[in-house]
Image (cartoon, rainbow, N blue to C red):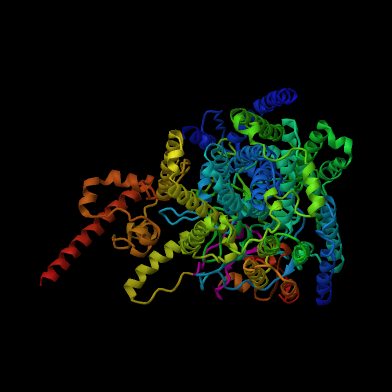
């Protein structure tokens, strides 16, 4: 078969791209942001352009399956499965880049809006925090949707879950790309000025997603006319948006205009449209064009300033993303072959001829479900659809969840000196609603229909493992790491010994209190309670080990090496002992006073 | 998990060539400053502004808002402030390639002949977009950095209209590009953002000293403690300026040298920053 | 932009909406009409809004707001699933206003909360509509025009 041999070629092509790609990726991971070229204005470079590109492609699957399903537009199972599979692969690739582009990768978790015991909290004003939440939720829910799709083939009671989930995913997929656009549009970079960026990015994402799916369908050896037409229609809209961008700021990306604006119009020519190579090449050209657009947007000074050029790592990263996609997609496609290409799953038609017929007959709403066509009176009373009844309770739970989350997060100490308004947290709200709603929906549905039995053992173990790992992660997050001393030894330190009482008041009293009892307000609000400095305890530990703790830290106690000398630390231990003795005497006196 | 641990921690793995060449000399720092002056950025587009007042942020201090004023009539762009700043704050050198591109780590940039450092804006755009809260505002008007909290997303640098923030692309210790001249200031690790701190360590030392000594005095005399106003502190750049063109002080303290120096002067700020309420402004001409 | 030009924009969108989703027009024709009207809105906004400097940033969103209003108007003429598409069109409008407002907020412009709330309120209320009569269509249009002009 021609299709499979092409797939094999692409698989090897993926391997050829992947092997140098993974080397570049490793070097980028090890060397950090100096490995790839960044422009002095945006500091970002290729990884972020790749992120925007792949997250755009990831929208295809959800768009095609969830939105079409929600709106009742007919699409065959096979196409929907392919599109969703490509979504998951693209999402996995897109998720790598924002992580690897960080300067300090191990601090990535600080972006999660969840408090730790010290009262640290992510800055929910930042579009990156919104971004992280949206993409995490989107990834989880896409995976769940795909799994439901697979299960629905075995157990028909899963089928009923798909439409409600599709209605939740419909806004989410648009929300995700809107938030990605806010990463750019909410900054002050002149090239990224644009309140219309949400619409612009969504149009671009839908366009690239459609191009990808059309390309993959060519690979499979069939076509869905509806998607070709949609691609063409979106290209027209995007052309107008580009024009507006040009009118507003004078920015124009010629390569994107030619590759993704002009060439796709060849689809209007019948002989091009009907040849498989023609369709495939046009899809490819659109993808290249949109890649160029993203790239030029992320690196505004590329080509303008001589200081900015691509190096091998940049090219390697691009190859890495493409190679990984081919390997991941074609590999999964093989594994899930029985689900994807089973002839029995066809329930739509392939060449689109009856869609054309529908159009002539009905004039609007391309390809609506035949069930609706027969049922001429499509009227449904308000708030009465079956999906709505299933979704009602979960949605309410979601809204409750978001209200609780907002009040809790806004009361965090981290925001004491920050003006936070509704605008700043609004973009994280829908993902939270969606996550809570879907979890409640599934739990309730499973409970009611006793679906636990239909899950396999592996699935149950997997869920248990995920829960345990999630719990461990949350616990570790909350506890926070101990503060490690800086790896840099101070080169010299003045050998001055200050009065220990002054040192204590300046350095220690904010937590431990001026009198050696805790500073109650501070300790309660910011830290887990430090160790009580009783005389017994101090005596049992000894001067050297206590001085060691002061200098090197332990648990939540910060390290003071570099700020205190060893002599000072020892003097502080003596001072601590004196305070403890005073406290003990005071307690004795109080106890005597009470007896009297 | 272990694989993820290695991936996330791999930049700290020491297995590739530990190059600990000799520490750079002061001479190299001087040369770099001289080079930076020849590669000055384009001039500032200045607009007139009012003298900064009390911060409008929640729970901001009513007593302190630290800032500086740079006298462009006196400044001749000699670059001594850049050198003093680098030595005070252990700012590393950059590699030859970076220097050729005009990308230095200096906290003070030359824009034509005017020194420009982070203006510590009241509504700083960089702080808004920092995802972890590493870039934050102190109640007395400093735009501060918590290096340990920085994840290196570089979003703050992107959102500063004048690129006052510098990113540690390299491990400058390993490359032998930095020397810790000042033990009070921690050297920054690879992958974090840094910028002018308005010599926060000097302010904090002074605050600690004032609080402990005045607390002791208050116990003796029984007089209530006067709030700390940061009197007598000077930033490294202000100290080093041969023409006294940089004046550091407290905008809310009538006795501060800053308020006195700017009293009869016309104040300016870069156009891109004017609406964010910069704490560091320029002065030119008499009013 | 003057009040007159703003009102003119509203009439303009109403005119464009009359051509959309005609019973006899196919997919391409609808798509072409939609793109063409967006093009017209862009040109209208470009020549109507005289100042696109950073001081007046609301203009950036103008053609897209016009398109959303146009879609709202056009849904009243749909033969089927009117309520669904009516609500979706209003949500799109709300979306454009809200997220446009958020981007502008980060650049120092206040969010037009009254307008957003009005559109959101309209969208929620219109989910309650049962069969939409001619009078109700008229009422909806009047409400949208009122939101456009007054908020």
Compare residues A437 and A75 and report the one nearer the observer: A75
Q: Is residue A5 above or below residue B177?
A: above
Image coords of residue A453 (percent x, y): 43, 39
Image coords of residue A157 (percent x, y): 52, 44
Q: Magenta segment, principal secondary structure?
A: loop
In this orientation, does residue A502 appear?
Answer: no
Q: Is residue A94 above or below residue B132?
A: above
Image coords of residue A583 (percent x, y): 22, 61
Magenta residue check for B251: yes
Compare residues A430 and B33 and report the one nearer the observer: A430
Left or right: A413 in relation to A547: right
Question: The magenta stretch spans which residues?
Answer: B229-255
Residue depicted at x 33% and y 58%: A512
- Find residue A377 and report its image quarter: bottom right
Image coords of residue A459 (percent x, y): 46, 36
Picture mark count: 0
Left or right: A75 in relation to A240: left
- Find residue B73 and report its image quarter: bottom right
Magenta residue check for B214: no
Compare residues C20 and A497 and report the one nearer the observer: C20
Q: Is residue A209 above or below residue C99?
A: above
Image quarter (top left, top right, bottom left or bottom right) of the C terminus of chain B: bottom right
Residue depicted at x 85% and y 62%: C19
Left or right: A329 in relation to C46: left
Q: Residue furthest left?
A: A596
């Amino acid at each position: 078969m021609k299709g499979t041999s092409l797939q094999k070629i692409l698989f090897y092509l993926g391997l050829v791209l992947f092997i140098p790609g993974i080397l570049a990726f490793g070097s980028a991971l090890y060397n950090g942001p100096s490995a790839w070229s960044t422009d002095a204005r945006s500091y970002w470079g290729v990884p972020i352009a790749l992120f925007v590109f792949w997250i755009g492609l990831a929208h295809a699957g959800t768009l095609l399956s969830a939105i079409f399903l929600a709106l009742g537009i007919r699409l065959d199972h096979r196409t929907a499965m392919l599109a969703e599979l490509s979504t998951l692969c693209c999402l996995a690739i897109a998720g790598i880049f924002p992580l690897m582009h960080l300067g300090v990768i191990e601090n990535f978790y600080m972006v999660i809006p969840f408090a730790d015991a010290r009262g640290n909290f992510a800055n929910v004003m930042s579009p990156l925090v919104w971004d992280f939440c949206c993409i995490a939720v989107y990834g989880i829910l896409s995976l769940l949707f795909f799994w439901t799709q697979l299960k629905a083939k075995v157990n028909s009671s899963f089928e009923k879950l798909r439409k409600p989930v599709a209605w939740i995913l419909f806004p989410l997929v648009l929300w995700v790309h809107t938030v990605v656009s806010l990463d750019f549009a909410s900054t002050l970079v002149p090239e990224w000025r644009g309140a219309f960026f949400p619409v612009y990015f969504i149009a671009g994402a839908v366009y690239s997603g459609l191009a990808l799916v059309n390309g993959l369908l060519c690979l499979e050896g069939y076509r869905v006319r509806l998607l070709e037409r949609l691609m063409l229609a979106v290209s027209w809209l995007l052309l107008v948006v580009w024009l507006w961008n040009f009118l507003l700021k004078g920015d124009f990306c010629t390569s994107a205009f030619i590759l993704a604006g002009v060439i796709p119009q060849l689809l209007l020519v019948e002989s091009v449209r009907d040849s498989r190579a023609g369709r495939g090449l046009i899809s490819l050209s659109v993808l290249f064009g949109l890649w160029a657009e993203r790239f030029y947007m992320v690196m505004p000074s590329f080509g303008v300033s001589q200081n900015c050029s691509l190096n091998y790592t940049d090219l390697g990263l691009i190859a890495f993303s493409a190679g990984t996609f081919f390997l991941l997609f074609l590999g999964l496609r093989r594994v899930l072959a029985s689900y994807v290409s089973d002839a029995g799953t066809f329930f739509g038609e392939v060449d689109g001829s009856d869609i054309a017929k529908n159009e002539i007959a009905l004039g609007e709403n391309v390809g609506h479900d035949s069930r609706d066509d027969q049922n001429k009176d499509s009227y449904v009373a308000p708030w009465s659809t079956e999906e709505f009844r299933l979704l009602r309770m979960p949605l309410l739970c979601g809204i409750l969840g978001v209200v609780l989350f907002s009040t809790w997060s806004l009361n965090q100490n981290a925001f004491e000196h920050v003006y936070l308004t509704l605008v700043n947290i609004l973009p994280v709200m829908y993902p939270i609603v969606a996550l809570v709603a879907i979890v409640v929906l599934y739990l309730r549905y499973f409970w009611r229909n006793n679906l636990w039995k239909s899950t396999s053992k592996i699935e149950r173990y997997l869920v248990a493992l995920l829960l345990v790992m999630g719990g461990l992660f949350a616990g570790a997050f909350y506890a926070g790491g101990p503060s490690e001393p800086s790896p840099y030894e101070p080169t010299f330190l003045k050998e001055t010994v200050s009065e220990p009482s002054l040192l204590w008041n300046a350095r220690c009293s904010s937590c431990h209190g001026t009198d050696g009892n805790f500073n109650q307000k501070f300790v309660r609000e910011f830290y887990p309670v430090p160790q009580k400095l009783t005389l017994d305890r101090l005596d049992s530990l000894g001067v050297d080990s206590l001085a060691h703790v002061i200098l090197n830290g332990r648990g939540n106690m910060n390290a003071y090496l570099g700020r205190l000398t060893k002599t000072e630390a020892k003097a502080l231990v003596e001072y601590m002992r004196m305070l403890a003795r005073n406290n003990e005497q005071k307690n004795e006196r109080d106890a005597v006073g009470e007896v009297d | 998990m272990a694989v993820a641990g290695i991936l996330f921690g791999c930049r700290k793995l020491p297995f590739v060539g530990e190059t600990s060449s000799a520490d750079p000399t002061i001479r190299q720092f001087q040369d770099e400053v001289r080079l930076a002056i020849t590669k000055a950025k384009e001039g500032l587009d200045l607009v007139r502004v009012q003298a900064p007042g009390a911060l409008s942020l929640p729970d901001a201090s009513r007593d302190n808002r630290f800032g500086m004023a740079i006298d462009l009539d006196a400044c001749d762009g000699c670059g001594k402030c850049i050198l003093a700043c680098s030595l005070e704050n252990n700012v590393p050198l950059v590699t030859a390639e970076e220097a050729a591109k005009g990308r230095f780590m200096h906290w003070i940039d030359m824009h034509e002949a005017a020194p420009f450092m982070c203006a510590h804006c009241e509504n700083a755009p960089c702080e808004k977009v920092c995802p972890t809260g590493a870039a934050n505002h102190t109640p007395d008007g400093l735009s501060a950095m918590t290096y340990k909290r920085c994840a290196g997303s570089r979003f703050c640098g992107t959102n500063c209209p004048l690129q006052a923030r510098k990113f540690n692309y390299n491990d400058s210790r390993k490359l032998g590009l930095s020397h810790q001249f000042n033990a009070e200031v921690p050297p920054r690790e690879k992958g974090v953002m840094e910028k002018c701190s308005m010599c926060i360590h000097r302010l904090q030392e002074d605050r600690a000293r004032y609080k402990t000594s005045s607390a002791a005095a208050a116990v003796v005399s029984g007089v209530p403690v006067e709030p700390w106003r940061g009197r007598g502190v000077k930033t490294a750049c202000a100290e080093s300026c041969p023409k006294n063109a940089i004046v550091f002080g407290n905008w809310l303290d009538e006795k501060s040298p800053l308020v006195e120096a700017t009293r009869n002067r016309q104040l300016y700020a870069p156009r891109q920053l004017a609406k964010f309420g910069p704490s560091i402004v320029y002065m030119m001409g008499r009013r | 932009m003057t009040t007159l030009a703003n009102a003119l924009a509203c009439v303009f969108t109403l005119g464009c909406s009359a051509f959309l989703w005609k019973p006899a027009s196919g997919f391409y024709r609808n798509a072409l009409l939609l793109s063409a009207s967006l093009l017209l809105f862009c040109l209208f906004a470009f020549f109507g809004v005289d100042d696109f400097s950073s001081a007046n940033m609301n203009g950036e969103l103008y053609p897209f707001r016009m398109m959303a209003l146009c879609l709202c108007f056009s849904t009243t003429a749909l033969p089927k699933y009117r309520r669904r598409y009516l609500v979706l069109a209003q949500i799109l409008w709300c979306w454009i206003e809200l997220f446009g407002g958020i981007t502008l907020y980060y650049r120092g412009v206040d969010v037009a909360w009254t307008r957003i709330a009005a559109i959101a309120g309209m969208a929620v209320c219109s989910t309650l509509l049962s069969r939409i009569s001619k009078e109700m269509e008229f009422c909806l249009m009047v409400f949208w025009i009122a939101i456009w002009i007054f908020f």
